[in-house]
Image (spheres, grey):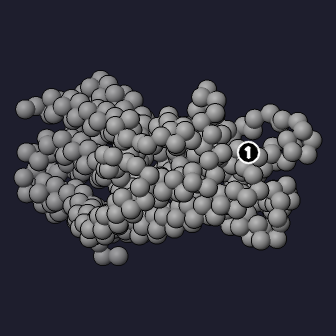
Amino acid sequence: MALVGKAVSLTLAFASNFFLFLFSMTSNFFLSFSCSLVTIFFVYIVVKGCIEVVTELTKRFTDYEALHLFATKSMKSLGRQRNLLSLLEEVYKTPCKRSEAQLKIRGIVGDLLCKKILKVKKKNFSGATRLSSPLTRLVFSLLEKLDSFDEASLKNFMISLHDLSFSLYLNAKKLRELIAVERLKHKVLQIASSMTLGFVIKIFFAFTRFSSTNLTYNVLTFVSFALLSITIFTTLTCTIQLRHPSFKDLVLCFTLFVALACLPLNG
Amino acid sequence: MSSESVIVLSSILMAIFSAIFNYQLKELRKHNFTTGSNPLLFKMLSIMRYMHQNIPSSFIALARLDSSRQILPSQLRSLAWKLSLGYGLETKTFDLPFFMGFPDTFTRNEQKIDEYMFQEIVRDLRKRLFTTNIRNIITLTLTGITITPVVVIISALFYQKGILELLPIVTSLFYGIVLQLIVVVLKRYASVLV
């Protein structure tokens, strides 16, 4: 719900900039308003899609890390505990962060323990239908069937799982590093572009003051155009950094833009 | 062209770019963000093969999963089912991008799989060299995107009216380029996700 609210508010910010820009170009209110309405609809779909993708990919990373944690813990326990029941008990008692994937693994293990000790089947845990990657879904379904493994094959299974989860973990780590580089690059570009635009508008404004022709009308158009460019760039490129688009970045860029555009030339 | 028609045209362009982007995102999500052949998928298949040799019961259990729960993609279910019955596998039945690039006659011949995995590693190394170039291209595009409004504004100082009428088109193109850039980067991320 909060994400939908964020998508709506960012779309409205986008649409108001777009309306300001169109209205500064033509005095036709009806045309500007109807074009902005169409844009609201399409931009909302785009921003919502971006937010969903970021949420899904972030969940996938958490899944990988949870799987790696589970496999590592199981491997450690396997050395001490020789039978499946005591191994599961030790894994179940491990404190875990309240991430969805970790809770899901804990749920699977708890379910198995219930089946083994109390001989009752618990109800399916809520996370069972959650979207995840095909690989983690496969591993989760294998975990659910842990009780069908005999003691001898359990060790092989855990070794395979550890091998797999380690590869996943390394991949996730590699990707996180890649994203960190992209994030830094974008942050610098966002700030630099808003400062440059502010400076150019300031020069333009000074030029109109000293020139003989009246360019004030054009200054308004360029200011709204610059604001719209900053909004497009800041709102949408957050997806590249696998972050939800936020008002914080937008406000920072706008402040830098306005500060550079409005400060007097002589300081 | 009058400024009114340029405004309408730019709105239509923005709508088209949004629709294309939405379609591309849907396609990415439909294939679970898995594009092309991924070294990790081969590792998974290799592990499944290994598990089959040691724990056939796991595949029997997998094959008996209730299909209504949709835990497993149908291709993996089919793979598990065939392995559990000891069938040789043919990739013709696996048409997802998931299994793209897999040898035509996938048998449980270890040597063949090892050879194939070696080829994948070589391909991965080549891809890394290519990735550096992709990163440079993305940096250049981003810089271009940042500079475009500045160039337009400076040009407008000298040729005001003509450039002013083109600004909505420039905005919609800028919007389209940013959206395509997002798709390119998401595809890059997808190449290391499973």
Q: Where the N terminus of chain B falls, by quadrant?
A: top left
Of the pair A133 and A80, the residue shown nearer to us: A80
Chain containing mark 1:
A
Which residue is at the front of the view, A126 or B57? B57
- Image quarter of residue A67: bottom right
Return the x and y of residue B133 as percentages of the image width and height: 23, 67
Q: Is residue A253 visible?
A: no
Q: Quadrant of residue B2?
A: top left
From this viewpoint, is residue B152 visible?
Answer: yes
Q: Secondary structure at mark 1?
A: helix
Q: Where in the figure is residue A6, as x and y percent of width and height?
A: 53, 42
Residue tagged 1: A148
Q: Quadrant of residue B169?
A: top left
The amino acid marked with disc number 1 is Ser
| Image coords of residue A7 (percent x, y) | 49, 40
Side of A217 where A48 appears, left or right: right
Kindly identify the residue that appears in the image at 54 percent across and 57 percent down. Answer: B50
Residue at screen point 11% across, 47% down: B163
Q: Kindly give the residue lying farthest to the right in the view shown.
A: A118
In the displayed structure, B12 sits above or below B159; it is above
Spot occupied by residue B171 in the image (x, y as percentages of width and height): 24, 45
Position of residue A73 in the picture relative to residue A213 (left or right):
right
Q: Residue at position x 76%, y 66% from top?
A: A78
- In depth, the one of B82 and A252 nearer the eye is B82
Q: Is residue A77 left or right of residue B6?
A: right
B12 versus B136 height, above or below: above
Tag 1: Cα neighbours inside 10 Å, few (<14), some, or many (≥20)?
some
Left/right placement of residue A37 relative to residue B164 reads right
Instruction: Between residue A225 and residue B38, name the one nearer to us.
Output: B38
Numbered marks: total: 1
Q: Residue at x 52, y 64 (%)?
A: A167
